[in-house]
Structure formats: C-alpha cells, structure tokens
Image (cartoon, rainbow, N blue to C red):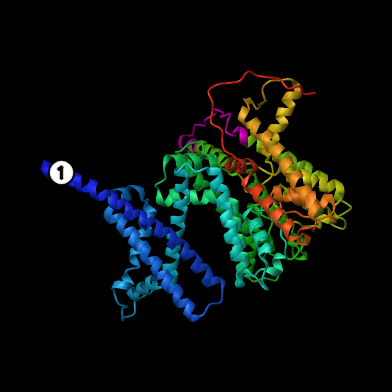
Amino acid sequence: MKIYHKFLLYQNKWIHPYVRMILGIMTSLTYLASLLLIVGVVYEHGFTISAEELRQLHLLYRGVWTVFMADVTLRILLEYKDTRRTFSKLTWILTVLLYLTLVPVIFHRPEEEGAILQFWDFLHGKTYQVVLLLLFSFLNISNGLVRLLGRRTNPSLILAVSFLIIILVGTGLLMLPRCTVNGISWVDSLFISTSAVCVTGLTSVDVASTFTPAGFVVIILLIQIGGLGVMTLTSFFAMFFMGNTSLYNQLVVRDMVSSNSLNSLLSTLVYILVFTLAIEGAGMLAIWSDIHGTMGMDLQEELAFSAFHAISAFCNAGFSTLPGNLGNPLVMTGHNPFYIYISLLIILGGIGFPILVNFKDIAVYHLRRVWNFLRTWNWDGRRFYHLYDLNTRIVLIVTFLLLLFGTAGIALFEWNASFAGMSVADKWTQAFFNAACPRTAGFSSVDLAGLGVQTLLVYLFLMWVGSGSQSTAGGIKVNAFAVVVLNLVAVLRGTDRVEVFGRELSYDSIRRSNATVVMSFGTLFLFVFVISILEPGVSLMAITFECVSALSTVGSSLNLTPSLGSDSKLLVALLMFIGRVGLITLMLGIIKQKKHTKYQYPSGQIIIN
C-alpha cells in the first residue's frame, strides 16, 4: 500500500508541471479566442458583409467554440479538485449549457415534430451559441483583468488603462458604417467615445442627426460601462461567476468600491448593480408615463427614448437623442414632470453608491423594527444614533445646499431673461433642472450661450464642485469640497483638529482633499492656457467653461465644442479622461510610490501670512 501511495505521489510530482503548462497554454488561447469572437461579432453586425465573409465568420465561431470546450474539459479532467473549488454555481451552469451545444453535433435532427425537435433547433441556433460564447468571452476577459491585480500591478494604472481600452473600442464601434448616417471622422468618433465612457456629454457633432439606432445603442452601452466603472463590472463578473480571486485582488477591489470588509465585498458589488438597474428602470417608467402619446412615437420608440434618457441621466452623461438636447420643443412644453424625473435621476446617480448602500442599511433597520413590532407587539424604543454615517451626512447636506442656492441663484438671474415668457411653474422647474445639470449631467434646456455672466459663474462653481465620491458624476467631489471648507473653518478658529458631527476628520482625508483642489486648479490653468493659444479667436470665458465642463465630466458648453480644431478636441478629450479616472488616481498610477519609512525628520515651520 505504501508503495502504491509513493507511486501516486511521484507520478503527480512528475505530471503536475506538464498539467500546469497545458492549462496555461489553454488560458492564453481562451483569451485570444475571446477577443477574436468579440471582434467577429462586431464586424458581422457593424458592416455589410458578403456570403463568403459570413461563412468565414461561422468558421471563426466554430473555432472559438472548440477552444472553450477544450479548455473547460481539460480543467475538469486534469484538475477537478481545483476546478470544483474555484468554479461558482453559475459557472457550472454555463458549463452545462456549453456542453448542451454538443447535442446537435452528436445527434441528427429529429424528423418528427414536437418539443424534442424545437429543443434541438434551439441548441443548434446561432443566437444561443453566439450569446453563450460571448458570456464566456466576457467572463474570461474579466477574470484576466482581475488576475492582473494579483500580480501586484498598480491598481490605479489598471483602472486608467481599462478606461482607455474601452474608449478605443468605442471609437472603433462608432466608426462602423451601420452606426452613423454619413460616416464620422476618427477625431470626432474618439471625442464622442471619450465623452460617453467618461459620462461627460460634450459632443463635437450633432448626435441626433449623426448616429443611427445602432450608434445610439453603442453610445448608451459605453455610458453604462463608464458610469458603473470598468473595474466594478469586471470585478463583479470575475468574483460572481469565477470565484477564484486572490486575497490581494479582493483588497484592491474593496478599496475601489469603498466596501466595509471583504465579507461584504461581493454584496457591495451586487448592490451597485442592483441599485443601478432598479433606479434606471424606475426612471424609465416614470419618463415613459410623462411622454406617452405626446411625442408622435410608437410604443417601442417611447420605451427606447425613456430607457436611453434614464441611463444617461443616472450616469450623469447628458446625452440625448433629441435635436437640441432637452431644449427640444417636443419636451419644453407641458413636460415639467419629465424635467423633475431627469433631475432626480441625476441627483441619485451623483450622491454615490456608498450612500445608496447606507440608505439600504437604514431601510432594512427600520423594516426590522416594524417587523419585530408586528410579531411581538412590543415597540423597540431604543435610538440608533449612527444610522447615517459621516460620509452620508456630509454629502447629503452639501448637495442640498448646492441645489438650494443653485436653484435660487439661477431663478434670480434668469427669471426675466432666459426664462422670460414661461409660467411660474415652468420657471422654477427649469431653475431646479439647470441647478441639477451642472452636478454633473450636462443636459441643456436653454441655450447656455445666452445666459448672463452671473449665471455662468454659478454654473462654473457647481461644475467644479461636482457630486459625491464613488458616484457616476465628476468634479472635485462634494466630499473634498466639504473637507476643505471645514479645514478652513478650523484654521480660522485656531483649532488643531477638524471636527464635524462628533467626529474628527482623518489627516489623510484632509491631505487628499487639499491635493485634489490644488491639482484641479493646476490642471485647469494648464489646459486653458494651451487651448487659448490654439484657439486665439475664442473668448477666455468660453474656453474656461469648456475646460471646467470637461474636467468635471459635465458636458455643458457655450456652443464651442463643434468649432474647435482637431488638436483642441483631443485636449478636451484628454481632460474628460483625466476627470473620469480622477486626478489622484491617475497620478498614483503614473508616479512611483515612496515606501513608508520608520524614521521622522525634525519638524520645521514655514512662515504663512
């Protein structure tokens, strides 16, 4: 018996390196097959192809199917224990569905009509097989990106590169013949793709007349990916379906999505996706209820219009399928609820996912109290003082104040100007809508070039501040703005600590907030300076407005974007990218981090004032 065990031990020791090598080769082949499949599907649906090209694409799909089948089979046969441990239940379900595609290969098509024939045709159908292969492709790519984190790759750099890859992919998709009416230049395609992925809304062409329904589908997908965040999506797919991420991967993703612990990491990712889909779905129904039967569209067009604008509003993107954006006459008259719904979606998307999760915790707490009361008829009178965490309190208060003063200021300055001729209800609705859009959605219902200087200054301030951290919005974030203001108050009062709501703000929060503000001003100055050289005939106000809008991923413009030269458009696109990835995040990915030292220099004083 001992000899038998020794034989198995030596056999395993001899074979295992070859097994790992084979599986490593198969992993590389699956990554390549995944990319080829996505390119093939895009080519098939983006171009008008011949019968010969279609036949070659079918051969490509068959080759990808063979690679995926071989990869799954080898993993089960050669490393069943590891496969059983790392595969989640959903991955096993997908594996079973993949093996079902062998049925049409092994068995001939049944001759008798019935359920068996329909089942055979369904498994043999191209739609079932291509959709299944696409799911496997996305899972493989997501798993590969998350595995990069396990190699101690700088997560900030991975985040920036992932956004860049999606932008480049979107650029290629928008240049497909089926996505545009009369074609588009690569600069404009890159600009629109960057604006969509960075959920900005600045457009260098007339979106409504340039893109086809297929183009709008690509734009809204880019907006959804950019709004949720590339790493959020890839991390969710890798952890939820593959289940084989390392501890380091989970720590990095936890910091990215601001989860409280590793135990709640997957649930936080699920909450982000569920909140997004639920809010966008509710917003879609609300918008549809207001526009139904009033815009000359059939039911399918109304639902598509509602879905597009609900996603664009929640992701703070500012894209619209209407000519003239939301200043189109179709919605400007008698559609105040529409503007209110859009504004609420903007606010919910801008307060940040951690706050939405906090709202969920608060709702669950109160529901449990009510349930216990109904079950025992004994009301729990104890108060829980910290239902709203510090981040939630600060963001909600600052957001409320900015919306309040923004609405009042815009109404005051534009009451008899841009809002002249409107009813009182319309004026207040438009004032509220135009105060919510700089937070950073970028929709427009009035010509911003016709606004007064005072209103434009209010716009600039609201755009620069932006909305909450870990949200779909941009700006320096209300969190950082609040911390800087609280630090200023502490300095003026002569206190050493920054305190609010019975809590002392951490030194790291103050440092990062101050660094964000300084870097924001520095970046804006540099880009305004360069673009003013490239566009000598444009006013400084228009350039500044454009740059602040791009860096804060707002999308508002004084009608300057289409008239910019190619070099200026690329600079504005770069600003949008910097604003979406984040100044701090981008610098952390570029600059080599200094190791923590155990020594400390003597303190020195710098004369200030």
Q: Which residues are magenta?
A: 372-391
- Vertical arrangement, residue 383 with respect to residue 11, above or below: above
Q: Is residue 391 visible?
A: yes
Residue at image x 49%, y 51%?
234
SS assignment at label 1: helix
Percent position of residue 39, x then y: 50, 66
- Vertical arrangement, residue 228 with respect to residue 98, above or below: above
Which amino acid is tagged 1?
His
Looking at the figure, which quarter contains the C terminus? Answer: top right
Report if residue 386 lies within the magenta region.
yes
- Vertical arrangement, residue 504 with respect to residue 114, above or below: above
Q: Quadrant of residue 93?
A: bottom left
Q: Nearer the viewer, residue 309 or 141?
A: 141
Report if residue 218 lies within the magenta region.
no
Q: Nearer the viewer, residue 40 or 554?
A: 40
Residue found at the very far right of the displayed protein: 416
Percent position of residue 368, x then y: 50, 38
